Image: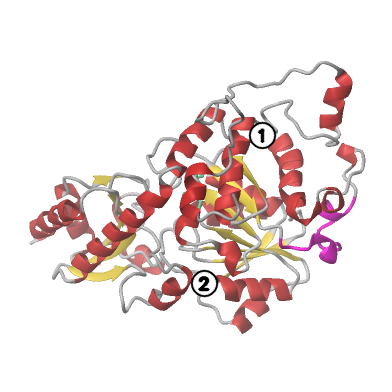
Amino acid sequence: MSDYKINTKCVQGGYQPENGGPRQIPIIQSTTFKYNTSEDMGKLFDLEASGYFYSRLQNPTCDYVAAKIAEMEGGTAGMLTSSGQAANFFSLFNICEAGSHIVSSSAIYGGTFNLISVTMAKMGIEATFVSPDASEEELHAAFKDNTRAMFGETIANPALTVLDIEKFAKVAHAHGVPLIVDNTFPTPVNCRPIEWGADIVTHSTTKYMDGHGSAVGGAIVDSGNFDWLAHADKYPGLCTPDESYHGIVYAEKFGQGGAFITKCVSQLMRDLGTVQSPQSAFYLNLGLESLHVRMPRHVENGQAVAEFLQKQPQVKHVSYSGLPGDPYYDIAKKYMPDGGCGVVSFELKGGRAAAETFMKNLKLAAIETHVADARTCCLNPATSTHRQMNEEQLAAAGIPAGLVRMSCGLEDKEDLIADLRQALEAIG
Ligand SMILES: *Cc1c(COP(=O)(O)O)cnc(C)c1O
C-alpha cells in the first residue's frame, strides 16, 4: 500500500482480505483466542511469535485499522487507543518516567495541557511550555539534560495556531529527542507530519477520522525514523532488557521501525488497558474510508464561513489559517497546501451578550462541546466551558467573552452562511 496515494490508502489501506474472506473488516468481538498447545501460547507471551491471545493487548479488528492509519501517515507501525487522551499519554509515557522532562507547545488541546501540566506532573514528569511561535533560540533554551520528548499540535485546538513542524523537529533532534505531533485537526489527508520530520504522530480519532460523532478513540503512529539506540542513555526502556519479557531489548529485537509501538502495546496497554473496542474500530474504519472525500468539503465550508464572517459588521476578528492576512496563512500553505480543517473561531464585538443572542438564533449550527464531525456545531467558551470566569479572567486567559468556535460540517455552505447571517442580524 505504501506506493499508493493517500486517497487510495483511506479506502483500501490496512486490511487485505484473503481469497474468499469478508470484503469489509471483520469485527472480531472476542476477548480471547484459542490455541492447541500451551507452547504455542507461550511464544506469544514471550513476544517470540506474533499473534493474538487477549484483546487488552491486541485485537485483529483494531490492528487492521491501526495499520491503515500508519500507512496514511507514512509510518512503520501504529496502534489504537480508547481515546485521544490515552494516545497522547501513551506516546509520552512510553519514553518518559519520573524525573523526565517534556518540552511542549503551549497551544494544545485543554485536555492535553491538563494531562501534561497536572497529571503527569504528579507522576514526577516536568514540562516546559513554549509558544508555538518561539524562535529556534527560545526552543533550544527550553531543553534540559532530562528532556525526553517534544510535543505540539499541527493545528492547535482551539487556538488554531499552526506548528512549524520542521523547526520543532530540527531543535528536538539537535537535543537527541523525538518530536511528537498531535495531527488530529488536519488529519493525514491534509498534513503528514512525518514528511516534515515528526517522529511520532498521535490522533484523537474521535474527530474528523471517525467524522460522524459516533465513537471516541485515539491512535499512535511511529515514523520508524528515530534512532533510539543512538540515544540509549536517554531511553533505557527501549534500549535495555525488559525483565517482564525475559530480558528482550525492544530497540534490538523489533528494530527502529517496530520498537516504540511494540513496547507501548506490550507494557503500557498491558498494564493500563485503555483499548479501543473492535466495534469502535469498525466505525472508525467506515469514517476513514471517506476521510479524503470529506476533508476538502470541511475546508471549503470553513473557508467560505471565515470569508463571510470577516465582512460582517458584528464581527471583530476571525481566526482561520486559510484567510490571507491570518498570522498562520503562509505556514499553513507550506504544511497544508490543500487547506487545514473546518474549524473557524471569531470574536463578536458585542461580547458575551452578543454571543448568547447569536448562538440562540442559530438553526443549523448546534451548540455542542464537540468539534470536527459531519454536522456544524459551535461553542462560546465564556458561557460554557469557561463560564465560571468573569470578563477580566477571560481576558487574562486570552479568551474574549464574545469568542465563538465554529466547527463547519458537511452541509451546503450557502445554507450555513444564511444561518449565520440571520443569527448575526438578530444581534442587531
Ligand atoms: C479532542 C482532542 C484530543 C482528545 O481526544 P479524545 O478522543 O477526546 O480523548 C486530543 N487532541 C486534540 C487536538 C483534540 O482535538
Q: Is residue 347 above or below residue 4?
A: below
Q: Quadrant of the C terminus?
A: bottom left
Q: Which residues are magenta?
A: 225-240
Position of 400 relative to 419 (above/below):
below
Q: Amino acid at mark 1?
A: Gly
Could you say which disc has been placed on residue 132 in the image?
2
Q: Residue at x 53, y 31 (%)?
A: 25
Percent position of residue 129, x then y: 58, 68
Q: Position of residue 295 (x, y in %)?
A: 38, 54
The picture places residue 196, in percent across and down from the top left corner, at 58, 69
Is residue 361 visible in the rendered image? The answer is: yes
Label 1 belongs to which residue? Answer: 273
Give the residue at x 67% y 30%. Answer: 56
Label 1 crowd bin: few (<14), some (14–19), many (20+), radius 10 Å: some
Of mark 2 and mark 1, the one earlier in the sequence is 2
Residue drawn at 50 percent across, 30 percent down: 24
